[in-house]
Amino acid sequence: MADQIYRVNMSTLTFTVEEVPTAWMGLGGRGLTSTIVAAEVDPECHPLGPNNKLVFAPGLLSGTAAANSGRNSCGAKSPLTGGIKESNVGGTSAGIMAKLGVKALIIEGQPTEGKFYHLHVSKEKVEIVEAPELVGKDNYEVLDAMLEKYDKKVAVMSIGRPGEMRMLLSNISVKDPKGKLRSHGRGGMGAVMGSKGIKCITVDAESYKETTLADPEKFKEASKVFTQALKDNPISGEGLPAFGTNVLVNIINEAGGLPTRNFREGQFEFAENICGETMAENIKARGGDTTHGCHAGCVIQCSQTYNDKEGNYLTSGFEYEMIWAYGANLGIKDLDVIAKIDALMDDLGVDAIETGNTLAMAVDAGILAYGDGAKAYELIANDIAKGTFLGRILGGGVGNFAKLYGMVRVPVVKNQSIPAYDPRAIKGQGVTYATSTMGADHTAGYAVATNILNSGGHIDPLTKEGQVALARNLQIATAAVDSTGMCIFVAFPALDDPKCLPALIDMINARFGVSLTGDDVVNLGKNILKLERAFNQRAGLTSADDRLPEFMKYEALPPHNALWDFTNEEIDAFWDF
Amino acid sequence: MADQIYRVNMSTLTFTVEEVPTAWMGLGGRGLTSTIVAAEVDPECHPLGPNNKLVFAPGLLSGTAAANSGRNSCGAKSPLTGGIKESNVGGTSAGIMAKLGVKALIIEGQPTEGKFYHLHVSKEKVEIVEAPELVGKDNYEVLDAMLEKYDKKVAVMSIGRPGEMRMLLSNISVKDPKGKLRSHGRGGMGAVMGSKGIKCITVDAESYKETTLADPEKFKEASKVFTQALKDNPISGEGLPAFGTNVLVNIINEAGGLPTRNFREGQFEFAENICGETMAENIKARGGDTTHGCHAGCVIQCSQTYNDKEGNYLTSGFEYEMIWAYGANLGIKDLDVIAKIDALMDDLGVDAIETGNTLAMAVDAGILAYGDGAKAYELIANDIAKGTFLGRILGGGVGNFAKLYGMVRVPVVKNQSIPAYDPRAIKGQGVTYATSTMGADHTAGYAVATNILNSGGHIDPLTKEGQVALARNLQIATAAVDSTGMCIFVAFPALDDPKCLPALIDMINARFGVSLTGDDVVNLGKNILKLERAFNQRAGLTSADDRLPEFMKYEALPPHNALWDFTNEEIDAFWDF
C-alpha cells in the first residue's frame, strides 16, 4: 500500500485520505511540510485563523532501521515570525506515522472558538472527537489519559494550557520512547494547534506495517556504514553521549560567545556550575542515566535522565539551549533549579529558548532579578500557565515583550529570539540567525560546528571572512537533512567523514528505488530554502528582516568586545545561489 | 532673518542652529518632516533607539494670518507601524515656532535611560535642562508648571506617564489657545519623545517677530477669498461649527458604516444618545460653548467646551473619532461618561482611537463588558497610567493585544488600528486605510467626503468602482495640504469651490515670493507619498502590508452585509502614479 495524505478539516470536522500527488512523492519532513504550506496556505492569512494549515510529515527515512531517522516535521505559517515555519522533533510520532503510511497529515479550517478536539489517526481513518475533559490539562496528564486509552506504543502529540491560550511561546509536545516529552519547538506551533481546536493527536501503533524497502540488502549495507560514521566521530560518538548537548557550556563560554545576562556578556562566571561535566557527575552520583535517545534507532543517545540529590527523577532531555537560557542568560547557577523548570516547561509545552529569553527581558523590566530561579519557576507555573496578565505578556515572547515595555535591546530576528550563541562572537552563527527563513534558529545552519568545534575545517568565529558562504552551505545541507528525518547531529560526521553522506544517500535510494546523487541532495536543500523564502516574501518579509538586532551593532560584547559588523550588502549576498 | 533648523542632540545634550538647506526651503509641515526623516533616519533603526529622530515642523503658512493654517507636523519612524509617521496638530506651537523662525526642530540621540529633560526653545537657543520634578506628572500638571514659569503665550508640547513609559498608544500633547490640550495622535509619537528623554518642550512666545510676507497685498486678497470659501461651504461653514466633527455619528450610522462592538456591526442602536445633535443640545442646555478653534485663525471652530449637567467643565475638543471609539465601538451610550474619559486621555496623552479600540479587544478577551464606562475609565486611569501589567498590555495597542491573546479579528493596518468608518461599508475609506503610508488613518485621504458627504461628487460607498482613484487623489491632495499647515477640513471647500485651492496657492506664493501652480502642488503631494513609501519599503514594509485585516474578507458587516472584496492587484494599483 502506497503512502497517503491524511487531511482533516476542523471547520467541517471531516477528513479525507488522498493519494500523494506526484510532485510530493520524493519529499519528506521539512521538504514536504514547506512544499505543502507554500502550495496551500495564503501567505497573507492570519496564522491563527481558518486559512492557515498545520502539517505533519515524517522524514524520508523515518520508519526504517536507519540510525537517527526518527524526526517528525511540523509546518505552518508561524504566528511568531509571520513567515513559514518548520520544526522537527524526536519522539515516536515520525516512525509510527511513516509505518502507518501517513506521508503527511494536513489540518485545515477552524472549529467554533473554545471547543477542543482529540484526533485519532489510524489506518485510512481519522476520528475527530470533542474532548472537553482534556481542556485545561497539561501534557503529562493528557499523555496519561491517552496511554490508558490506547496501546502503550501509541504516538501522542499534544498541547498544554499555553497552547490552548494560543501563546506564541507554546510548543507541540510529542511522546518519546521512554514516555517523556519532546517538543516541536519555536515559532509558536502550539498556538497554531490550539487555534485549530486540537488538544491532542494520537496515531495508532497497532495497525501499522513495517516500512517496505526497495533494496533491503543495499539499505542494510549503507546503514552499517552510516551508523559506524556516527560512532567514529568524536562529537557524535563521544562528546554528545558523555555529556549531552550540554557539553557546549564550557566550550562556548571559553570562546566568549555564551550570552550572559540578556546578551550583555559572552562569559558566565558560574559556567562550571551548570556545564555538561558537572551534569554528568551529578547523574553518575545520583543514579540517573547519561545516555538515552529521543527516538528509537538513535545511536548518539545525547539525552539523559537527571535526578535530584535524593535520587528522585527531575527531568530528561535536559539540553544545552535550556540550560543556557536559564543559566547564563538568566543568571541561575543551580542546575537542579534549572532541571525543575525544564520539567515544568515540558509539561506546559512552552519553548525553552523563547521563555527563558523573555524572562531575561522581564529582568530588565524589573519584574524579577537575575538568578532568582524560584521566581522564574513561579512566573511560568502561575502566570504563563494560568494566563494572568503578566502571563499573557510573557507568553508573547521577547519581541512582543519589548514592544510593551518600549525596550531597545531586543535579541530577536524575525521576532524569534536568539539562541545560545552570541552572534557577535560567533559570526557564522550570526549569519544563520540573520538569513534563516525561520527567524533566529541555531539548528537552521549550525556554524558553531566550523567556527568553534572545528568540524568541516575552521573559520575564525571573530572575523567576517568566509562566514556567509559557511552559513549558506550549512543551511542548504540542513534543509536537505531536515527532509530525511535525520537528527541534526549527523552533520558532524557528514562534515568530516567522506563515507557518511554517500551512505545516507544510498539509504534513501535503497528505500525508494531511486538514484539520487550528492548534487540532487544539494539541489533539494537549495530548493527548500528558496521555496520558504518566496513564501516569506509573499507574506511581507524582506531583506530588512534578515537583520540582527540593531543594538548588537553598537554594544560591544565582552570579553572580545565584539560587534556585529556585517554590512547589509554582505548579508544579502547570502541569497546569491 | 531667514528661518533656521534647530537641532538638539540628546546623547550629548547639545544643540546647533543651522541654515536651512536649499532642498528643504520650499517645504513645511509633513513635506518637511518626512523629507528630514527619510534623509537622516536609517529605516532599519529601532524606533525607540538612539538612531531615530523626532522632527517638528510648522506648515508653510503657519504663523501667517491665513485662516486655519495653525497645524504643526511631527515626524519620526513610528514604533507602532515600523514605518514613517507624520502627525499634525492644532494648538499654538505651529504659529509660535514659525514666527520664531524655526523651520524645523530636529531631536536626535538618546540620554541615559530614565532621565527626563525639558527643552526651552528661544531665538537661536535651546536650553536643555534635566527635569526630575516633572517625571511622573501628566500633561495638565506639566502645562501648569510651564505657565507659571513663562509668559502665558508660551508654546508647550509634553508627554504624560504613558509617553514616559514608551507606550505605543501615547501622544504628544500641545497647548491650545484656551489652555486646553491637542494631540499629535497615532503612531506612538509620545513614545518616541519619551525615548528621547524629553518630558516637555516649550517655545518662547516673547522674542518672536511677525512672519514676513513677500507680497502682503496679494496675500491679504487671497486670504479673504480663501476664508470666504471656508465660510460658504455647508460642511466647514455650517455643519462643523454647529455640531463639531460629531455631526458624523448620525450620518455614518445612517450609512451603516459606524463600526459597532469591535467592528461587528455597522449601526449602533444608541447612536441618538451620542450624536452631534445631542451633544449640541447638551452644550446649549448646560452652558458650554459649541464653537471654538483648536488654533488661532481658525474660522471653522469645530471644537467646543462640554459641561456636565451641573454646568461644570468636563472636556473640550470632543471629537467624533473619540465618541465613536467609546460610544459605538465600546458600547458606552452616555455622552457624559465618554466626555470624562476624553478629558482623562488628554491629561495622560493617549490616543483616543488606539486606546478605545484596544479596550474593545479587551472586551473580546473578557476583561470588561461592552458599555461599562466606569471600568473603561478605571483601566485607563489605574492600569494604563500606572503601567500595571494589564496597563502594559493595553498600552501596546490593538495589534499587540491580539498577539498576546491569540486573536484573529484584528482591526489594524500596519499595526495601527482602524478609525471610525468601517471599510467594508465605506470602501473608498478602506482603500485609504490599506494604502496609506501611515497605517490605518482616516485623515490621510478622507474618502468619506465623496462616499458619504457628496463633496467632490459622489461615489457609491458600497461598490468598488472608482474608489482606488478617489483614495489616490485625496491622499495626494492631503499630503500637499498637510505641508501648508492647513487643517484637513479645508478639503471640503477645496473639493467643491473652484476658488478655494487657487486662493490657497496664491497665499503660499505671496508668502514666499514664488509662483507655484496647481500642478506643482499635486506634484508635491505625489512626491511626499512616494518618499514616504520608499522609506517604508527600506524599513521592510511591502504590498503585503497594504492590506485590510483578513477577517473583513469573510465576516460580513450588517446591515449591508458588506465584505471587503478588493483583490490584491486592485489595491496595489493605487501606487500606479
Image (spheres, coloured by chain):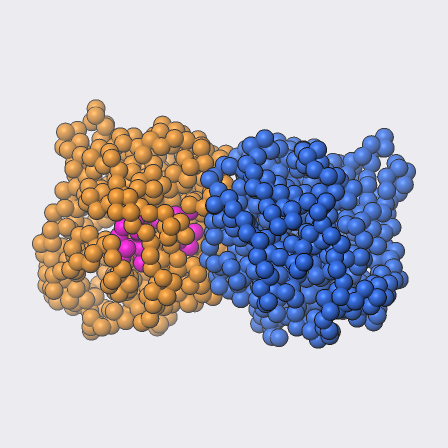
Chain colours: A orange, B blue
Q: Which residues are magenta?
A: A410-432
Quarter holding residue B513:
bottom right
Q: Residue at x 72, y 45 (%)?
A: B206
Quarter holding residue A7:
bottom left
| Residue A334 within the segment the image draws in magenta | no
Q: Is residue B217 left or right of residue B175?
A: right
Q: Residue at x 74, y 52 (%)?
A: B209
In the image, residue A524 above or below residue B162: below
Q: Where is residue B467 drawn, in percent x and y?
A: 69, 69
| Residue A421 within the segment the image draws in magenta | yes
Q: Where is residue B538 drawn, in percent x and y?
A: 48, 63
In the image, residue B178 above or below residue B463: above
Q: Is residue B462 left or right of residue A574?
A: right
Q: Is residue A136 visible?
A: no
Point out the residue furthest to the top here. A310
Q: Is residue A557 visible?
A: yes
- The one nearer the camera, B483 or A213, is B483
